[in-house]
Image: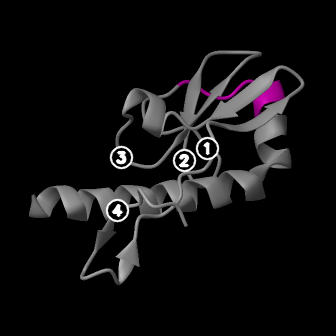
Amino acid sequence: MSVDKRRKQNGRLTEPDMPPRTIVDDHGVRIENLYCSQGDHAPPHLHVSGHGDEVRIGQNGKPLEHEPALSGHQREIVTRYRNRIRKALKKIGRWHWFHSLVDRRQ
């Protein structure tokens, strides 16, 4: 555990790890986590780009509301890496939950 991690509830809870920026980079399709680099917002989601429009996807690998549909190639990659996507989104959800509680108390 790094020294610069935030803690709350008298040290009982430690800041969760954020997944890496690039979750998947396969056959020209990238699935990325932009929370830390661009200050993204809830709900937890990932950005899919390459071989079609950029699309934000949720936990089930489907586009968020008001997002364009995934292209066939994007959908194939998302399906192939669904478990990795879910794991990353769970980490983002825990990170977001931790920071929303910390921010409310300040």
Residue 68 sits above or below residue 75 on the image: above
Q: Residue at x 76, y 29 (%)?
A: 74
Residue 57 sits above or below residue 90 on the image: above
Which segment is the magenta one?
Answer: 68-75
Viewer-proximal residue, 61 or 4?
4
Left of 37 or right of it: where is 73?
Answer: right
Q: Which residue is mark 4?
A: 6
Secondary structure type for disc 3? loop
- Indicate which label's residue lies in the foreground, 3 or 1: 3
Amino acid type of the residue tagged 1 in the rendering: Lys
Q: Which residue is mark 2?
A: 58
Magenta run includes residue 72? yes
- Indicate which label's residue lies in the foreground, 3 or 4: 4
Quarter of the image where one finds residue 33: top right
Specify which label sits upstream in the sequence, 3 or 2.
3
Residue 29 sits above or below residue 33 on the image: above
Image quarter of the C terminus: bottom left
Around disc 3, counting alpha carbons within 10 Å, would you say few (fewer than 14), some (14 to 19), or many (20 or more)?
A: few
Secondary structure type for disc 1? loop
Q: Which mark is residue 38?
A: none
Q: Which residue is mark 3?
A: 42
Left of 95 or right of it: where is 62?
Answer: right
Q: Residue at x 18, y 55 (%)?
A: 103
Around disc 1, counting alpha carbons within 10 Å, would you say few (fewer than 14), some (14 to 19), or many (20 or more)?
A: some
- Indicate which label's residue lies in the foreground, 1 or 4: 4
Q: CA distance from mark 2 to mark 1?
A: 6 Å
Specify the farthest residue to the front.
3
Around disc 2, counting alpha carbons within 10 Å, would you say few (fewer than 14), some (14 to 19), or many (20 or more)?
A: some
Amino acid type of the residue tagged 3 in the rendering: Ala
- Indicate which label's residue lies in the foreground, 2 or 4: 4
